[in-house]
Each structure stands twice: as structure tokens, then as C-alpha cells.
Amino acid sequence: MACSGKRTLISILLALLALVMSMAAASAAKDYTKKGALDPASTHYIVLQPRRGRGGVGQERFFCLARGRCRYKTLECPAECANRKPRNNKRVKGCFADCSSRCETTCKHRMPNCNGYGSVCYDPRFVGGDGQMFYFHGAKGGDFALVSDEQFQINVHFIGTRPEGRARDFTWVQALAVMFDSHALVVAARKVAAWDDRFDALAVRWDGTEVVVPADGEAEWRAPKEEGAREVVVERTGESNSVRVTVAGLLEMDVKVVPITEEEDRAHGYRLPPGDAFAHLEMQYRFAALSDRVEGILGQTYRPDYVSPVKKGVAMPMMGGEDKYKVPSFLSTRCGYCRFRPAARIVDESAVVDVAQY
């Protein structure tokens, strides 16, 4: 009888422990998602044959493998967004399967959300991993570390203009470079005199060579397969000027090329010179494996001990740090606070990388 009572007590204690651990895991997952991060469990699935619906349109299905309450469950895309990649890459929502504790499929836009976590848009305005919005001036022609961590670094190149009588440059992000292992992936906005939506002003380079992202079929480019290398995919999310980039195990980002419109020019007093649409990037990042010591203009905001220094309640809260995150060249991994140390040389830093060639 005593033994039976003891076993019952132990069972109750184990059940309580399991409940506490489950709640802690759920809370951690919630915080992880709140920061716009990629929960590795969310995409741990096998894609099944789609279920055929009306008109022959199949709703994609996913068999979840992640541990937790979603393990071995089958999720199906909603009818309103039946596929992960919409047909013809139209600017509509795609299906996103989440095999983490959320255990659901949802319809999401495949364009940068300039008000979402990890976004960099406008001139330029950031929303950090802490959800706080801030601006960063930088400098025309300057290169800065956006994120620098143990496994990778993201640099950005600024274009800009300084009207007569203004003390600082107006700046926009014209190009980004993701550097990891011994590779460099560059996404840039080409310089165009006048904006035309039908013209693809987006350029992609892989290890120094420009690559073409097809506009038909799967509408994606994949890096050449190497044994033990990360999978790198660039897929179109619109007919032109927008892509989603995935570097397996590190990050996913949505990138879009946009111009400065005449209305924006008048509203903000940019006084842009003629013959240049100042095509630039709008971006939103989701990270899969950041350390607690991550650095960079955006990266620092994902640290668990981060406290934002920007003033709250003002129209344009400014973030300093130009001196901490400025790099000597676009593909350099060296700055005052940079943490990424590539095992092999990514580029010959003695060579001049002319970002303006785009």
C-alpha cells in the first residue's frame, strides 16, 4: 500500500514536471517567434502529395517530424493559399506550414513587412528583434555590418544624397552581402534613371559571379551543390524586383527593390538630382541560429540582454554606432564590433569591390 502511494506521488510529480517543462518550452517558442526568428522545428516536415480540390488545384500537405505535440501530424494548406509558392509568382499570399508548437498552416505575404520584426526599409528605418523602431543614418557610399555573429555576417552598402544646406546625407540601402563559410551572396538594386515596374532592377551575385533567377518554372536559383555545404535558394516572389533568400540553418530574408517616388521626394525634401530613381532595397530578416553575443546595427537588437539606447516617443528615434559597425569595404568582415571570423578567405580584400557597378 505504501509502495503504491509512493508510485502515485512520483507519477504526480513527474506529470507536474512535464507540465512545467511544456509551459516553459511554449513560452520560449512564443518569445522566439515574437522576435521574428525562425524556429527550426517549424519547417521540419516532409512534403506530401497535394490533395486535389476543385478545378484540379491541389492543397499542399506536410507530414511533421518535429518533436512535440505536432509530431507525426499532417497539416494541409488553406484553400485560399493552396501552395507554398503561388502560381506565376503573383503578389499573393503563400502557404506557410509551422510544425513547431503552433502546429498550423497560415497564409502569408512573401514580401518584406516594413513594420515587422527584422525589417529594414525607407531611409533607412529599422524594426529590431526587440520590436523597437529606430533610424540609422550611416553615410553615402558607406558600408556597415548589419548582423555579425559566429557563423555569418551581413553587410549593407548605402547610397544617398545631400541637398545644399543639409548637414547630413539622406541614405538608403542599395545592396546587401551575406557572408558565411567561404561564400558571399550579394543582392543589389541596379541604378536606373527612371523607374519602370516591368524592368527587373534586382541583381544577384554568388561568389563574385552574377546569376540569373528564372522568372518561369520553379522561378528559383540554387547554389551549386557541394558536399556538406548549406543549401542556398533564391526564389522570385513577384514577376520582377522581389525575391526570398534562404540560407539553410542561418536565415531567411525577403527582399524587394523599390524607387524613391516623386511624392516621397516632395514630402521628405530629398531634392533628388535628375536621372536617378535611387532604387534601393526593402528587407525583412528571420534568423535561425543567432548567438547571445550577436552584433551589428540590427543584430545587436536580438541579444537577450539588449536594452535599446534610442529615445522613445520621438518621431525619428536615432541609433548611433557608425564607428562600431563601419567596415572598410563592402565584402569585409572587419569592424570594431564584428564577430564573424571566416575559416577561409571569402574575397581578396585588396581588390576593390565596386558596388556601383549594379
Image (cartoon, helix red, strand yellow):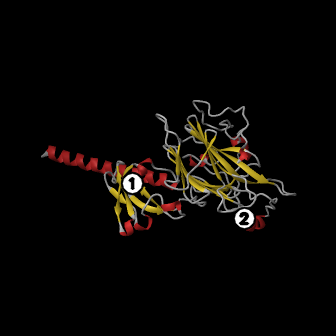
Q: Residues within 10 Å of mark 2 (few under 14, many from 20)?
A: few
Residue 250 - label: none
Q: CA distance from mark 1 to mark 2?
A: 42 Å
Mark toward the start of the polypeptide (1 vs 2) = 1
- From this view, report whether residue 327 is shown above or below residue 286: above
The one of 41 and 173 positioned closer to us in this rendering: 173
> x and y percent of residue 349 in the render?
69, 33
Q: Is residue 42 left or right of residue 190?
A: left
Q: Which residue is mark 1?
A: 101
User: Would residue 29 be visible to someone looking at this image?
Assistant: yes
Point out the residue furthest to the left here. Answer: 1
**Mark 1: which amino acid?**
Ser
Q: Position of residue 20 (x, y in %)?
A: 35, 51
The furthest residue to the front: 216
Q: Nearer the viewer, residue 283 or 35?
A: 283
Instruction: Out of 328 and 248, give the one closest to the viewer.
Output: 248
Q: Amino acid at mark 2?
A: Thr
As drawn, 326 above or below 268: above
**Residue drawn at (35%, 48%), measured in percent from left and top?**
65
Q: Which residue is mark 2?
A: 261
118 up-or-down from 322: above or below: below
Q: Which percent across, then down, holds residue 222?
A: 52, 45
Q: Please, what secondary structure does the residue beneath circle 2 have?
A: loop
Question: Where is residue 50 drawn, in percent x and y?
Answer: 36, 59
